[in-house]
Amino acid sequence: LKANNARSLWHPMTAPSDSLKNQPTIVTGAQGVRITDVDGHEVVDAVGGLWNVNLGYSCQPVKDAIAAQLDTLPYYSIFRGTSNDKVIELAEELRAFFAPDGLVRAFFTSGGSDSVETALRLARQYHKIRGEGARVKYLSLKKGYHGTHTGAASVNGNANFRTAYEPLLPGCFHIPAPYTYRNPFNETDPAKLAQLCLQALEDEIAFQGAGTIAAFIMEPILGAGGVIPPHPSFMPGVEKICRKHGILLIADEVITAFGRTGAWTGARLWGVKPDFACTAKAITNGYFPFGAVMIGEAVAEVFESDETGRAAIGHGYTYSGHPVGAAAAIACLAETQRLNVKDNAAARGAELHAGLLALQSKYEAIGDVRGGHGLMHAIELVSDRASKAAPDKATAGKVQKVAYEAGAMVRVSGPNIILSPSLVLTAEDVQVILSALDAGFAAL
Ligand code: PMP
């Protein structure tokens, strides 16, 4: 396996030359919150798969649901004149789950990028149905991550995910993110920074012309950009501005939905009601590639009452509403609620956060510790705390390597070490992660 790891396989988001030089860890097994590699080394998976394995790797009710579904209806499309029983059941469950966010319809996809693409496209179509066809532009946040399809990549805030594929969609503009540690305003007060970013949004809307903008998309807590929770005033402020200008609000909840933030959804964490919520990842806990876009009542009304023929959706995937994925999602949603994972995320997240702050007081290399909402955390490394200079590129990788030997898989993203473990983590597992990181930083 090691010899062939990068011979016939290209690893996404990785330079092929890098995979050839640095052997990617080969995972061969997983149980509970732990993974085992090809050498038999077992560690706590502090990445939780890829922010998605919220329930851990041994979720029997989901396995049973998938097996049963394979025996009854392994596949049927929900295109043009057909539907299937499982996906109807799931849509009802999701509607109940998302009702407090004002989201009442589900459009099914095969993953996160598909969900973002779907929301972006439906947003444009919504305006066309209403006779506002000039609304085609999208606004998003500079540190945002929304996926890899051409539309989703166009709204990505980080240019590293865009430049190799340009020209992308025209009409996408990126607003400064409320990132307290580093921002163009040099503002260190989170509440004031939120106001400055909201003003930047207003300014961009005025510059572009409100009547040209279809939607604003944001993650309730920026994830891949380095786990950046905004001040509580920020997302409600965005919502207000969007409403004022007739711009649709898309919440990219691919990471934040289903309890990760300590609330059931990111929208509920901040008390906003978006027009769309993009979901994927934990919706099936890694057991099946699946996603859903939840749609708000007012948007649903426009599509459903349209008699002009413009609302023929003309968008969907072969695997939209896959019955096996739907069965997995129904079981995941039931387990998620039965175990009340959001409360464990909040409790374990608080322990992890306190432990990371303790590490920060011990190690100069830790410039910033972010988190504080459930189980999504980032440690930003610096070479010098006063200047906040970025560390040598290899530094975070060194910490990761030693932490792995010491018992925890963590993720490196630029100068950040990112933690997003399963929400069924125990207090002991939290300590394993912290002591592994301690070993990693001690080795620098
Ligand atoms: N949106 C967000 C917020 C994400 O974190 C991701 C994936 N990390 C995506 C969209 C894209 O999802 P996928 O990789 O399933 O296409």
Image (cartoon, rainbow, N blue to C red):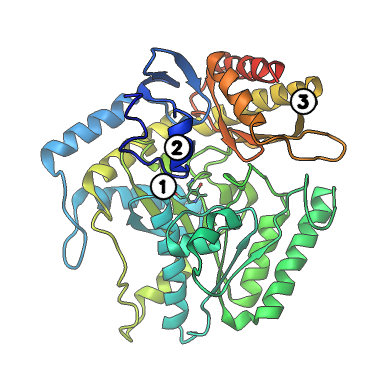
Determine which quarter of the picture holds residue 301. Answer: bottom left
Q: Secondary structure at mark 1?
A: loop
The answer to whether any part of residue 95 appears in the image is yes
Res 53 seen here: no
Label 2 sits on a secondary structure element that is loop
Between the residue at mark 1 and the residue at mark 3, the CA separation in whole angstroms equals 33 Å
Residue 105 is left or right of residue 296, and the answer is: left
Where residue 278 sits in the image (x, y, percent)? 46, 55
Q: Is residue 174 above or below residue 204?
A: above
Q: Is residue 352 toward the left or the right of residue 310 in the image? A: right
Question: In percent of the image, x 19 and y 53: which residue is there?
Answer: 84
Q: Which residue is mark 2?
A: 52
Q: Earlier in the sequence, mark 1 or mark 3?
A: 1
Q: Amino acid at mark 2?
A: Asn
- Amino acid tagged 1: Ala
Q: Is label 1 in contact with label 2 (beta carbons under 8 Å)?
A: yes
Question: Circle 2: is it few (<14), some (14-19), or many (20+) Cα within 10 Å?
Answer: many
Camera-nearest residue between 392 and 372: 392
Q: Which residue was labeled with disc 3?
A: 360
CA–CA distance in space, label 3 to label 2: 27 Å
